[in-house]
Amino acid sequence: MHIDTDHWDKQDYLAFILLYLAEADGQLEDQELQYIADHLGKEHLDHIRQPASQCNDFQCLEVMRELRPRFYPDQSGLESLKLEMTELCKAGNRFSQFEHEVIEMIAKQL
């Protein structure tokens, strides 16, 4: 499946990653969706929900990997992404070991 990312901006890309992370534990919580919508704008969340739901893990990671140099270049960009992912996990007043490991796994793929 091809995801058309030609018109994505930085907020769309970040929403895609945060949505992927939020779904990683198999439970997409309202608090997580609200955090993404509040942090990036509901329009960005709405824009990427359908493409995100249509790709498997491999495809999602490929999209993340391909677009990172455009929006979050270099090591400082990766650190910024990790911070954004951490903030999402903290939004639910918890930050589990599982979530920490998923963030590290995503970061290694990027």
Image (spheres, rainbow, N blue to C red):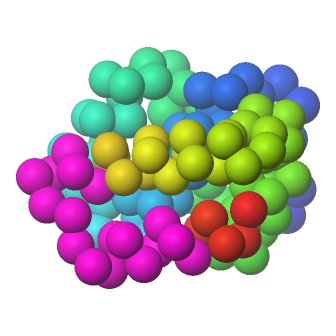
In the image, 30: left or right of 23? left
Task: Name the residue at 26% across, 35% down.
Answer: 34
Image location (x, y in percent) of residue 18: 48, 49
Q: Residue furthest left?
A: 93
Q: Is residue 60 above or below residue 91?
A: below
Task: Name the residue at 87% across, 53% down.
Answer: 66
Image location (x, y in percent) of residue 61: 72, 66
Task: Name the residue at 44% across, 46% down.
Answer: 83
Q: Residue furthest front?
A: 76
Q: Is residue 102 above or below residue 69?
A: below
Which quadrant would the C terminus be assigned to in this image? bottom right
Q: Main secondary structure of the magenta part?
A: helix
Residue 51 visible (yes or no): no
In the image, 75: left or right of 28? right
Which sits in the foreground, 95 or 49?
95
The range drawn in magenta is 89-105
In the image, 25: left or right of 14? left
Residue 13 visible (yes or no): yes
Task: Name the residue at 57% across, 76% down.
Answer: 105
Which quadrant would the N terminus be assigned to in this image? bottom right
Number of disc labels:
0
When asked about the image quadrant of residue 97, the answer is bottom left
Image location (x, y in percent) of residue 104: 52, 72
Which sits in the foreground, 48 or 20?
20
Please say whether residue 92 is one of the residues in the magenta stretch.
yes
Please say whether residue 108 is one of the residues in the magenta stretch.
no
Image location (x, y in percent) of residue 58: 74, 76
When asked about the image quadrant of residue 89, the answer is bottom left
